[in-house]
């Protein structure tokens, strides 16, 4: 059954440039490794999307209600609905020495920051480098291959998914929580205590829960330290 606005769905997707077939993003580990996109420490798994919340490109988000569970679908997004047309005015030639003076050894396709703006190195000539300040995917038609893996139905499933979205390094089943009509208490396992960015993540969890479940007015996190067993 197709999803509708406000539904919590888990999706796998692979995104590529139509013109070249180049894959630039995926939730699938095997695809990431095959396409040399794999990043150590990155978590590859179905991603939570709340339909209509703009968590993906608008054109993709608007197409989600038409997708069926477990069926791979392809969504084509033209440049004007993706990252816009490519603007020739945003391409500049700069002296090579300005980059080398900053410790940058230019390579084709390298992403750098120049005058506090992100740019891509397009060409390297005799003493000059062409910098493109357009977004890397500007002017490209994008293809999103999406499979909706699951439509989350229960309040418990949805809250667990919201927590995992902010704290993906901890397996969903390891974070226990209890809810009453207006309160939720989330028990954080010890492995989550020292994760980088855990405090902003907890704030994000609280904000998300209160947004989608406005009846919950208090979100409480508890940290339990268990006594370590010592040998005799």
Image (spheres, helix red, strand yellow):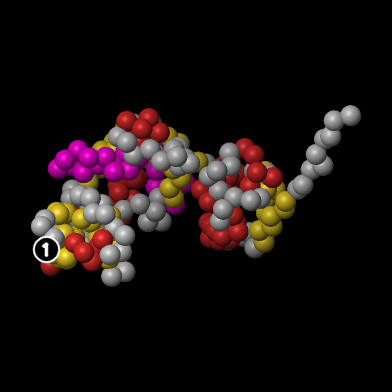
Q: Residue at x 41, y 56 (%)?
A: 53
Please name the residue that numbered disc 1 is placed on: 88
- Residue 61 percent across, percent down from the top left: 33, 50
The residue tagged with tag 1: helix, strand or loop?
A: helix
Foreground residue, 116 or 18? 116
Q: Is residue 183 at all visible to an observer of this figure?
A: no
Q: Residue at x 12, y 67 (%)?
A: 89
- Residue 202 percent across, percent down from the top left: 60, 56
Q: Is residue 89 left or right of residue 204?
A: left
Q: Is residue 45 at all visible to an observer of this figure?
A: yes
Q: Residue at x 25, y 62 (%)?
A: 99
Q: Is residue 201 left or right of residue 82?
A: right
Q: Quadrant of the C terminus?
A: top right
Residue range highlighted in magenta: 3-26
Foreground residue, 67 or 130? 130
Q: Is residue 11 magenta?
A: yes
55 in relation to 229, above or below: below
């Amino acid at each position: 059954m197709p999803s509708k606005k406000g539904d919590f769905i888990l999706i796998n997707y692979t995104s590529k440039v139509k013109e070249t077939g180049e894959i630039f993003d995926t939730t699938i580990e095997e695809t990431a490794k095959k396409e040399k996109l794999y990043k150590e420490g990155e978590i590859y798994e179905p991603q939570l999307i709340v339909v209509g919340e703009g968590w993906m490109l608008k054109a993709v988000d608007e197409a989600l209600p038409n997708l069926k569970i477990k069926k791979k679908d392809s969504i084509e997004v033209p440049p004007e609905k993706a990252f816009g047309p490519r603007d020739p005015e945003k391409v500049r030639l700069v002296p090579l020495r300005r980059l080398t003076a900053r410790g940058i050894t230019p390579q084709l396709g390298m992403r750098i920051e120049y005058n506090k703006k992100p740019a891509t190195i397009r060409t390297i000539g005799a003493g000059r480098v062409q910098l493109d300040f357009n977004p890397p995917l500007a002017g490209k038609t994008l293809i999103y291959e999406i499979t909706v893996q699951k439509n989350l139905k229960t309040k418990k499933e949805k809250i667990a998914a919201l927590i995992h979205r902010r704290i993906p390094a901890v397996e969903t089943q390891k974070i226990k929580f209890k809810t009453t009509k207006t309160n939720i208490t989330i028990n954080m396992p010890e492995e989550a205590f020292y994760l980088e960015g855990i405090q902003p993540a907890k704030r994000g969890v609280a904000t998300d829960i209160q947004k989608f479940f406005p009846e919950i007015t208090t979100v409480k996190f508890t940290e339990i330290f268990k006594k370590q067993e010592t040998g005799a």
